[in-house]
Image (tube, grey):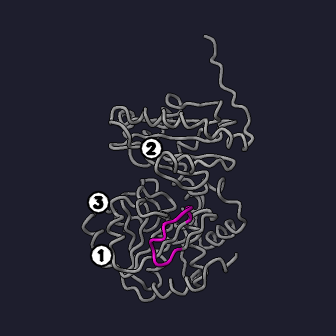
Amino acid sequence: MNSKIFDTQDLKSFKRLIDSAQEIVLTCHVRPDGDAIGSTLGLCLLLNATGHHAVVVTPDLAPKSLSFVPGMKDVVAATKYPDYAKEKIANADLIICCDFNKPYRQDALAPLIQEASCKKVLIDHHEDPDYFADITFSYPKMSSTCEVVFRLIAALGLYSALDKDAATALCTGLITDTRNFSVNCDNPETYEILMRLLEKGVDKQRIVKEALETRSYDSLRLQSYALYEKLEVFPQHHAAVITLNMEELKRFGYERGDTEGVVNIPLEIRGVVYSFFLREETNMVKVSARSVNGFPVNEICSRYFGGGGHVMAAGGEYRDGDAETRLERCRKALINVMPEFDTKVRKTKPEKIVMPTRDKQ
């Protein structure tokens, strides 16, 4: 594994900051996913195991599908414990920001982090980072932030201190951000990292089962409804869109995480190059996008939905219009921009989408 990817001076400075810090806070983006939780907890557990005092503070609660990750019970969610989260941030000697490239991705937690007087370090793998931290480790070509964290641990000579719990957290991010090694994982060194995590006793099958293959009864019903009733396919654009409003979500007892992965499923249709999932929230529409064959959904999200992300995995928000019409306006806005990207779709050389003919009764 290439250990020379990091700037030597940055590594030395990072080590000095860690060694001199009494109180370390690790934090991530709003609506934390497996990579956000895995990278913060993986590094947090390692730091605590090596004599430091570290804690993870998240903007809000993680989905229940990640409750198995070691250390989750000690995570401080700012929406649940606002005063305690504020206290931990204010008293921190070092803040390590994981898995986000811009402060706004922390929502209401962003001002507290930005106003903190201590040193800050950013560890991330998203494109176009804001250089708001004192040290930035940004590597968009890596599979996940957990991969960046593991490489940092190895470069700092701390691999021997990595135990099964910390390795499990890191492996969770590696697995979830690559969809169990189906995307963003063409670098052979990513699999070397997986091997070295497995050597620590990580149960990969359990991670896959808990994080990717386990749903509640209501969640499965909601997913089935979304696919059967709300999926639209646009053959001429090789695109698919799923929309869900708040009434529909409430009908199925929606909880955070229940629609995780829904946006990926239309990509299984032969010929679909990109997929969007539009989920209505109180003051906005949450936009999620996925693609195949290098089609840049991040361009659509950045240009029209105030977001961004990876080339084939991105997101954003839509806030225009009143509550009654916002979701439909968002849907129409997306459909209207599809022709602009037809040329880039054709460059992926997609197969023709064959739409079904209904059985005659």
Kindly identify which numbered label has been placed on residue 216.
2
Q: Quick one: 329 or 87, which is closer to the camera? A: 329
Q: Which residue is mark 1?
A: 90
Q: CA distance from mark 3 to mark 2?
A: 23 Å
Q: How many discs mark residues in the rendered view? A: 3
Q: Which residue is mark 3?
A: 80
Q: Earlier in the sequence, mark 1 or mark 2?
A: 1
Mark 3: amino acid: Lys
Q: Position of residue 182 (x, y in %)?
A: 66, 53
Relative horizontal placement of residue 266, taking residue 282 as reference (left or right): right
Relative horizontal placement of residue 218, taking residue 89 as reference (left or right): right
Residue pictured at 46% horizontal, 50% vertical: 306
Q: Position of residue 241 (x, y in %)?
A: 54, 36
- Label 3: which secondary element: loop
Q: Quadrant of residue 219?
A: top left
Residue pictured at 49% horizontal, 64% vertical: 101
> Foreground mark, 3 or 2?
3
On screen, residue 153 above or below 256? below
Q: CA distance from mark 1 to mark 2?
A: 38 Å
Q: Which residues are magenta?
A: 125-136
Q: Are marks 1 and 2 in contact (CB under 8 Å)?
A: no
